[in-house]
Amino acid sequence: MKTLDFFFDFGSPNAYYSWKVLPGILKRTGAEANVIPVLLGGLFKLTGNQPPMVAFSAVKGKLAYEQLESQRFMKKHGIHAFRFNPHFPVNTLLIMSGLIAARRLGIGDAYIEAVLKAMWEDGLKMDDPAIAAGVLSAAGLDAQAILTATQDPAVKAELAANTEAAAARGAFGIPTFFVGEEMFFGKDRLGQVEDELR
């Protein structure tokens, strides 16, 4: 079975879009996804990259066009619940460490669903531990066990190692996908990802 590596951080709206579209791609290609949690802020530091709203803030029309592309993408793929998080940018260290902790507890996918919804549908401030705990509890997950585990040095080390490995492999932003050694960046490359998986 072919595997798709998906470098992922909750802080990217494009990671949300990609997660929504991915199940169809996996079903059509018979592939499986390996979601690899990385820290987007750390990846930016390692590669000298910047968020688009910083990098392109002075480029006339660029950010408006990015927004137009996102609207087209959502329309094409029937994504209706998205709304831009009013607290953006959200520091994702807590929730990304939480993802690693949740996986160790065997509830990674349920955790991703709950946190993506909170971030990109409900507009919640997910770097606030109390808010994150409420979201996880409402989703039926053991918030205390997950948030306690985020302080485990081994969890922090895994997140840092994943981030360094992503940069070493050539990733500079989120979402980044690998099919074998072929790298694809951004939600707009998902068609190419699907072609490669075939």
Image (cartoon, rainbow, N blue to C red):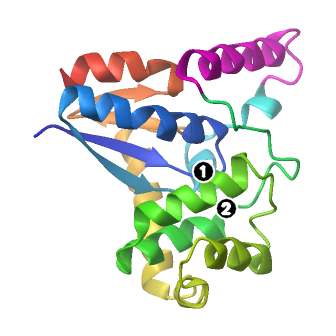
Q: Which numbered circle lies on residue 181?
A: none
- In the image, taking residue 194 as reference, residue 38 lies left or right, namely right
Q: Nearer the viewer, residue 5 or 132?
A: 132
Q: Could you classify mark 2 by the number of other residues whose Cα lies within 10 Å: few (under 14), some (14-19), or many (20 or more)? A: many
| Residue beneath the point at 56% across and 51% down | 9
Q: Which numbered circle lies on residue 40?
A: 1
Instruction: Please state which of the two labelled residues, at mark 1 or mark 2, is closer to the viewer.
Output: 2
Measured from the top left, where is residue 175 in percent x and y? 51, 37
Measured from the top left, where is residue 11 in percent x and y? 66, 50
Q: Which residue is mark 2?
A: 92
In this picture, is 103 found above or below 178? below
Question: Secondary structure beneath disc 1?
Answer: helix
Question: Secondary structure beneath disc 2?
Answer: loop
Measured from the top left, where is residue 105 in percent x and y? 38, 81
Q: Amino acid at mark 2?
A: Thr
- In the image, taking residue 155 as reference, residue 50 lies left or right, namely right
Q: Amino acid at mark 1?
A: Leu
Q: CA distance from mark 1 to mark 2?
A: 8 Å
Magenta: main secondary structure: helix
Task: Say if the magenta span includes residue 72.
Answer: yes
Write down the region rendered in magenta.
56-78
Quadrant in the picture for residue 71 = top right
- Quadrant of the image containing the N terminus: top left
In this picture, is 13 found above or below 89? above
| Residue beneath the point at 51% across and 19% down | 188
Task: Say if the magenta span includes residue 195.
Answer: no
Q: Nearer the viewer, residue 84 or 188?
A: 84
- Quadrant of the image containing the C terminus: top left
Quadrant in the picture for residue 44 = top right
